[in-house]
Image (cartoon, coloured by chain):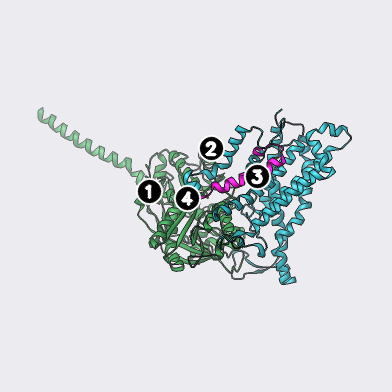
Amino acid sequence: MDAILLQILNGLDKGGAYALIALGLTLVFGTLGVVNFAHGALFMLGAFCAVTVQKILTLSLKVKDESITFFDAYKEQPYLELWFGDFGTKIIDWSVPISIVIAIPIMLLIGLAMERGLIRHFYKRPHADQILVTFGLAIVMQEIIKSFFGANPIPTPAPEIVAGSAPIGVLLGLGESVVYPWWRLIYLLFSGVVIFAVFAFLQFTTFGMVVRAGMHDRETVGLLGINVERRFTIVFGIAAVVAGLAGVMYVPILPPDYHMGMDFLVLSFVVVVVGGMGSLGGAVAAGFLLGILQSFASMNEIKDIIPGIDQIIIYLVAVVIILVRPRGLMGRKGVMED
Amino acid sequence: MSDDKTNTSELSRRGFMKVGAAALTAASMPMFFTKDAWAAKEFRNNPGNAGTVKFGFNVPQSGAYADEGADELRAYKLAVKHINGEGDGGMLNTMKPLSLKGNGILGKKLEYVTGDTQTKSDAARASAKRMIEKDGVVMITGGSSSGVAVAVQGLCQEMGVIFMAGLTHSNDTTGKDKRRYGFRHFFNAYMSGAALGPVLKQEMGTERKAYHLTADYTWGWTQEESIKNTTEALGWKTTAAVRTPVGAGDFSQYITPVLNSGADVLILNHYGKDMINSLTQAVQFGLRDKQVNGKNFEIVVPLFSRLMAQGAGENIKGILGTTNWNWALQDEGSKAFVKSFGQEYGFPPSMAAHTCYVQALLYANAVEQAGSFYPPEVIKTLEGFKFDGTGNGPTEYRAEDHQCFKDVLVVRGNQNPTSQFDLLNVEQIVPRSQVEYDAKIFGGELGPYEV
């Protein structure tokens, strides 16, 4: 029972990350019709917003270790700690949550610049061209990050107060051994809030209504005198913000490195395809479904019966779903079928 | 008449024997006494009378181990400088015995080309093949993965070019997959286990239950086996040994089962990014604050480096493991290398840089000593070669499996670093005698000298 509860939680928090990344990907595809292979790089850029904020907050006074003469070795003391004492330490400790506030405008700007500067020139080009140009863009972005930050992962911890585990077993009467990391629970909650906010924005605002109408019939909405393109540009910006926030929040779980976007890219495409190309609800449902399946497939009891199942489960399920429902779980007719 | 005939016949035979013996002696003399005599024997990429000779540095320049690869490349460039007589000479001042004269190799200036392994076996083989066929290198060296080392070593055996492995820790590299043309200076998983065993016993006792998370490839498998053998010999029980995909990123689905497994030690047979991620996540799951079976839960990382400690941050503090070398060692060889490297690049070398630097020197020295680039002669010179002054105490390239035997370091993540590089504390320098084993236990065949 304990093991099952833990794997469900684990699947949900994995699914939350998959759903957040896939949501932005499918939003861009559904509105602009662009297959954006640079979406993983936006996730990575979000993560590096957190790294940059941490580096700024930990700018330090360097005291040289005189015993080492062949190179410069320093003991570092952050200026914030020197100037503000414990309060400075607290600010550094909260660098990841602080990064969220800073990442929103930065990711929005990156998204808008990307769409206006490059992607819009490929709207009418074949999907193969879109894939090539966005994939190339992703490689350029990750190499830029590598040249600044190196290839090694950079530790970016969560605030001390939520760095440990929540005693959920005690709360549920299951015993002390059932614990789950606070930050993963926060991530699950955060992904739920962001997903809800995106849906609410599209469902309950005039802007969202126009976007949804544009997704169904772009030409007609344009003929009504509405500038759909401008709204779609903003949608691209929103997708970049969602991917960036997913990245910022993920850094305490996975110390970021320049390649982390690519690691998630294939997985998030599988999520989008399983959910149904262009379907927001499908992406979210598939994200959680695949997260939970992956989690359960990694249990020793399951692996004892089918060795290696944990490494193929996602792709196996994707094959089965596409065979049974070629448009994915909630895919619409006519999308990517021309 | 008949007498005459007889006499003629006897003289003739004797004369033939004399002339034959003289001719044979004359023919074989240059092979033993003339410098570079084996050059007459044709072999792949024979530099012949050229004034230069090339090494091929096959290191990860992209992918997860790019930082480690960059450090390997820095060390190789330094080795080239020192072999050519430039710079301060580094370990050429401390290595004994030394045949190199600081004028290149056999008077030829050393040059190099580089390849990117991408830490993928197929990419590594392709770049090694390109350097052998197109660039004409006499030796391939480098790498940060056992999968890559085994693959490139196999290729080098087929092509008759010596491979001086970089960072590879799997027992298989000099065990079941050993090759006549492959040599490893780095230590291996068996040695890590043998070095760690007594320290684990002293710190954690003999009644422990261990849970292994293991990278699912040659290195992970052999490390798991070696550490299991060591801990079970101490009296520990192995609760589970779970294989995890390389580059999984999020290991939480493999860590949650540990919580209720009854295990009180988690052994992470992961390296690089995988180790950084799995350790970070294990700490988040509260494993280091946990009490199981009345004991503090412990995490052990049998192999780690300073670069990995940097990525793991606070989480590595206090964690036990082993390493091949550390820049803070105070022997003359280490000091000479750290000085050269530090002055050249502004920071200390990693253990990957160290092993690569030493490998380049060892090959060059063997050629100089053999008086030839002819691979079978260089191999014979390296086999059983005993040397000192390269940072690991007295060392031997064992002839039976081409594995270097030397002291091993047991390290612990530093709780109170004095600088950004002071991340590992050397807890013990375990003597070579404690980590030695019979070459037969891992099987394998070296293969022929001539290919």
Q: Colour of chain A?
A: cyan
Marks 2 and 3 on same chain: no
Mark 4–mark 3 Cα distance, whole angstroms, equals 33 Å
Q: Is residue B229 above or below residue B25?
A: below
Q: In the rendered view, does A321 fall on the left or right side of B373? A: right
- Foreground: disc 3 or disc 1: 3
**Label placed on residue B134:** 2
Front in this rendered view, residue A101 or B398: A101
Callout 1: SS: helix
Residue at numbered disc 4: B219
Structural crowding at the residue carrying mark 4, measured as other residues with C-alpha within 10 Å and reported as few (<14), some (14–19) or many (≥20): many
Residue at numbered disc 1: B380
Which chain does green denote in the image? Answer: B
Residue at numbered disc 3: A287
Mark 3–mark 1 Cα distance, whole angstroms, equals 58 Å
Q: Is residue A295 magenta?
A: yes
Callout 2: SS: loop
* Residue at 83% across, 31% down: A219
Query: Which residues are the magenta region?
Result: A273-300
Mark 2 belongs to which amino acid? Lys
